[in-house]
């Protein structure tokens, strides 16, 4: 560590060195030199060495074993997670799931929960988005059942605060919603007050990939709502703002939403609450909207019950 020329190479390969030495070092005294060297890297004034220490942290845990984590590594892990350099914190976020697996459920929940919460609220979107990739697998290992909904809600709120108008980052959050939403299934307040407003915001985004992604996610979220009245309120908003929207873009988006709702809900539910609004678009004044609505015709016909819906079938056939 004291040699400035050799230090980066040693830090880069530290995980492999520890793994290669694991069979020969069996006691805390044997590991003393390795632990001191790793501590020096994790506390070094050079950000590059701290970043390499964070990158190698899972390998160091693997070599030392979970029993030595509390005494020798936990303080260093917390220090790296709070490092002033974003790249260091990013490496900690990337390795957190692996560390949780190595520690086991009990130790991970005890030692990593604070680190997870800290990274969830990080000021840099890159750190939050990297954590978001693994959050659905981290929660069972680290959060504990009672904290899962709270952490998901906090993660989404904190991420939204720093994303701004970065549409690729917004798309990453949208794509994470289906994986994270099940943790909110028992928390209707977070689902209604955090996740759904976020989804509606992205559905109104300027970038088509974000809009389309949010539209695909929305029906599944609505289906998770426990109260039918709340579901119908959401669907009513979709019909008002998109199905009868002033711009042809909104009405075209509604056609995509209708197809997603067809996949998520029963034919009866769609027939009773969305069929009429979808059929109205078959006579839309804008040709592109009519063409998009016409592609739904086979699906719409399958929602009908004959002979009760004979009149509706005749309308669709025209």
Image: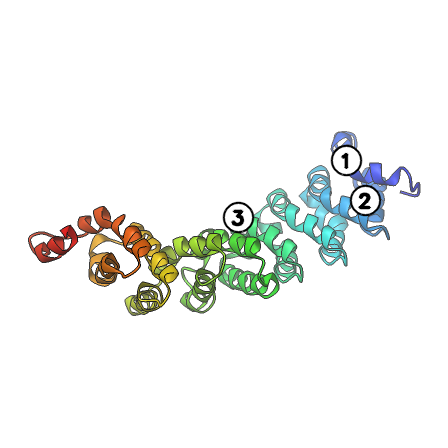
Could you tell me which secondary element the residue under label 2 belongs to? helix
Q: Residue furthest right?
A: 3
**Mark number, residue 38:** 2
Q: Residue furthest left?
A: 307
**Mark number, residue 137:** 3
Q: Nearer the viewer, residue 108 or 87?
A: 87
Q: Nearer the viewer, residue 66 or 258?
A: 258
- The x, y position of residue 242, in whole percent, is 35, 64
Asked if one can make out residue 152 in the rendered structure from this viewpoint, the answer is: yes
Q: Residue at x 81, y 44 (%)?
A: 38
- The x, y position of residue 125, in whole percent, is 63, 58
The reply, left or right, for residue 119 in relation to residue 205 is right
- The x, y position of residue 218, in whole percent, is 39, 58
- The x, y position of residue 182, in whole percent, is 43, 55
Q: How is the image coloured?
A: rainbow
The answer for how far apart the CA atoms under marks 1 and 3 are is 27 Å
Q: Earlier in the sequence, mark 1 or mark 3?
A: 1
Q: Quadrant of residue 250?
A: bottom left
**Mark number, residue 18:** 1
- Observer-side mark, 1 or 3, equals 3
Q: Residue at x 51, y 59 (%)?
A: 148
């Amino acid at each position: 560590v004291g040699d400035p020329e050799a230090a980066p190479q040693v830090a880069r390969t530290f995980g492999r060195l520890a793994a290669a030495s694991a069979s020969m070092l069996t006691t805390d005294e044997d590991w003393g030199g390795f632990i001191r060297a790793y501590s020096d890297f994790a506390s070094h004034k050079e950000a590059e060495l701290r970043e390499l220490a964070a990158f190698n942290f899972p390998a160091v845990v693997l070599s030392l074993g979970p029993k030595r984590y509390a005494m020798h590594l936990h303080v260093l892990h917390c220090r790296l997670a709070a490092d002033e350099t974003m790249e260091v914190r990013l490496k900690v976020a990337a390795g957190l799931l692996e560390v949780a697996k190595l520690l086991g459920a009990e130790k991970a929940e005890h030692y990593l929960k604070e680190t997870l919460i800290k990274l969830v609220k990080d000021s840099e979107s890159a750190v939050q988005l990297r954590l978001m990739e693994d959050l659905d697998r981290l929660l069972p290992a680290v959060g504990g059942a009672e904290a899962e909904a709270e952490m998901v809600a906090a993660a989404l709120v904190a991420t939204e605060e720093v994303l701004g108008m970065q549409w690729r980052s917004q798309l990453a959050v949208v794509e994470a919603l289906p994986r994270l939403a099940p943790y909110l299934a028992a928390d209707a307040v977070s689902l209604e007050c955090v996740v759904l407003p976020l989804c509606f915001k992205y559905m109104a985004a300027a970038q088509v990939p974000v809009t389309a992604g949010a539209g695909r996610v929305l029906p599944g979220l609505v289906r998770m709502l426990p109260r039918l009245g709340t579901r119908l309120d959401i669907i009513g908003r979709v019909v008002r703002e998109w199905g009868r929207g002033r711009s042809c873009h909104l009405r075209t988006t509604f056609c995509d939403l209708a197809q997603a709702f067809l996949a998520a809900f029963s034919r009866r539910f769609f027939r009773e609450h969305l069929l009429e609004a979808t059929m109205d678009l078959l006579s839309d004044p804008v040709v592109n909207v009519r063409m998009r609505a016409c592609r739904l015709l086979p699906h719409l016909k399958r929602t009908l019950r004959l002979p009760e819906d004979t009149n509706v079938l005749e309308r669709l056939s025209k």
